[in-house]
Amino acid sequence: MTTPHTSPHTSVNLAHQLSRFHDHWAQRKIADLNDYEVKLAKLKGEFVWHCHPDTDELFLVISGRLTIRLRDGDVALEPGELFVVPRGAEHCPVADEETAVLLLEPAGVLNTGDAGGELTRSVESLD
């Protein structure tokens, strides 16, 4: 399915798309890539420990700093750095300051994975 902002003749300006929302931990879809969704999110504070049993999850830091806590150690990310959380790895993203990230994961993946809870949100599209 192609949405207007993923037309082969239209680019996506990340700064503009990030300026369109302000809530933390809510993912916004900016493009489809085969069976995957390319999403933006603004993070601040500590998320919930969770895992995605059936898929990896890619985090690319656009601005700010992100620590991804894993049971066997932390991964610290600066702007321009990415990390792929392996399938089934329990993790907890933490952002001490507001951090903008690009996420890549299969369509339909819940942000809280297997944990559920009050931070679970459906993905909204930025058209």
Image (cartoon, grey):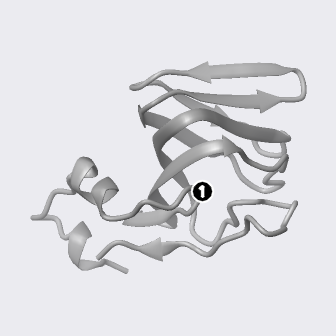
Residue under numbered circle 1: 25
Task: Tell me the crowding category of disc 1: few under 14, some 14 to 19, or many 20 or more residues within 10 angstroms, Cα based.
Answer: many
Q: Nearer the viewer, residue 56 or 95?
A: 95
Residue 39 placed where, x, y %? 46, 58
Residue at 73 percent across and 64 percent down: it is: 119
- Quarter of the image with the N terminus is bottom left
Residue at 52 percent across and 27 percent down: it is: 65
Would residue 65 be found to the left or right of residue 30 on screen?
right
Residue 116 placed where, x, y %? 84, 67
Camera sees residue 17: yes
Q: Nearer the viewer, residue 96 or 54?
A: 96
Would residue 118 be found to the left or right of residue 104 on screen?
right
Camera sees residue 33: no
- Quarter of the image with the C terminus is bottom left
Give the quadrant of residue 46.
top right
Q: Amino acid at mark 1?
A: Trp
Please determine whether, in this image, residue 107 is positioned above or below residue 87.
Answer: below
Would residue 90 be found to the left or right of residue 19 on screen?
right
Q: Nearer the viewer, residue 91 or 15?
A: 15
Residue 102 placed where, x, y %? 45, 46
Residue at 84 percent across and 54 percent down: it is: 53
Identify the secondary structure beneath mark 1: loop
Would residue 77 be found to the left or right of residue 39 on screen?
right
Residue at 60 percent across and 56 percent down: it is: 25
Please determine whether, in this image, residue 118 is positioned above or below residue 54.
Answer: below
